[in-house]
Amino acid sequence: MRRTVFDTDHEAFRETVRAFIEAEVGPVYDKWYESGIVPRDFYYKLGELGIFGIEVPTEYGGAGVESFKFQAVLTEELARAAVSFGGSSVHVALCLPYLLAYATTEQKQRWLPGFVSGATMFAIAMTEPGTGSDLAGMRTTAVRSADGGHYVLNGAKTFITGGVHADRVIVCARTAPPRADDRRHGISLFVVDTTSPGYQVGRKLDKLGLKVSDTAELSFTDVVVPVSDRLGDEHEGFNYLGQNLPQERLSIAVGGYAQAKAAVRFAQQYTSQRTVFGQAVAGFQNTKFELAACQAEVDAAEAVVDRALEAHDRGELTAANAASAKLFCTETASRVIDRCLQLHGGYGYITEYPVARLYADSRVNRIYGGTSEVMKLIIAKNMGL
């Protein structure tokens, strides 16, 4: 069936991104994979291509397009090639919505031109050691000075994608203790300059997958943050986080679907070329049945993603909708990619084959942005259970 979620502008963007990946990423991706990080200068190329500025208003150097669909196209093309732009996915998909929604005009004038060009890379620091998905349990604090002009930030964060290259990090911290009837009260957001004294990047974490994303531990020791770098109102941070979670989970759902689709493509290519017992692996009935079953699951995930993308552009994507899309697409991807890796035999376990990278990269989809179990709780609550 013909997809109708994308128009001619989206498809032209797809062609541009695909050509860029083939020319600028494919030839060097193995080196990035081995080193475990994307070169910092590469982000300037993405800025020049316009990747970072699609949704940024024109007055700050962007294109001013109010649609998430272009980011969905980018996600699909990266999965198709089984490559990554590293931590820059967080820069756009996670950080930009907070800047657009809650930054003042003065803050936007300071931050967004560099955001668009790649000169100022952003990350977001929510998760802390020992808290996981329980954001209300965070212990990082930001205490306001006696004169009211700044905050003093102390604490630690972990699993921060983009944390090595980041120039600014949106840090979630407690500015007041939780209330007895509301653990979420008292969290604020700060856009922290990573050159500040007391700000420290710890270990770059060695992950199972997503090898080229610079995921790190961060620590803050008496970091002075000007009040002018607080994002939004004091104590309202948890509400802000909740409002962006549907888009974050939609982006993960798109990634899961796209990875599953790519895995089927890789498996079909491999089994058509690989011969066993004198015939192509694709000629065996079991192979045909496995690929057909995987394709049916991908078709279903595509329908879920496309419906969610349309709802998001209309401003109608609810938290439960996004949780359902994430749960279905990521669980589907897990099954499909595993079966496609099996069709590669022993070569599916070798990382030079893209299906092996997809297998490792996709596993985290059921964890970050809220685990599958958390998604089920959200869906169940929406059902009145």
Image (tube, rainbow, N blue to C red):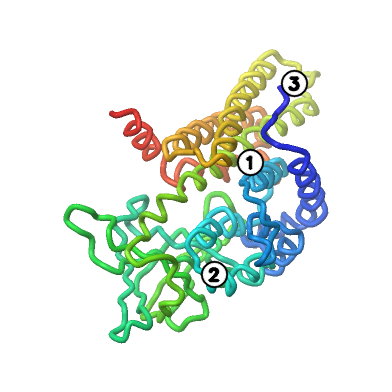
| Picture residue at 66% right of the left edge, 72% below the top | 119
Callout 2: SS = helix
- Where residue 261 appears, as percent x and y from the top left, is 66, 32
Q: In the image, what residue type sits under mark 1? A: Ala
Measured along the vertical axis of the image, is residue 353 above or below residue 276? Answer: below
How many circles with numbers are drawn on the protein? Answer: 3
The image's mark for residue 282 is 3
Pinpoint residue 139: horizontal percent, then vertical percent. 30, 65
Q: Position of residue 226 (x, y in %)?
A: 43, 80
Mark number for residue 98? none
Task: Judge by depth and name the residue closer to the eye, 349 or 252.
Answer: 252
Disc ID at residue 356: 1
Q: In the rendered image, which residue does mark 2 sit on?
A: 105
Q: Quadrant of the C terminus?
A: top left
Foreground of the two, 13 or 344? 13
Q: CA distance from mark 1 to mark 2?
A: 45 Å
Q: Residue at x 69, y 67 (%)?
A: 117
Residue sitting nearer the eye, 12 or 32: 12
Dot 2 alpha-carbon crowd within 10 angstroms: few under 14, some 14 to 19, many 20 or more: few
Question: How many angstroms separate mark 2 from mark 3 (CA)?
Answer: 58 Å
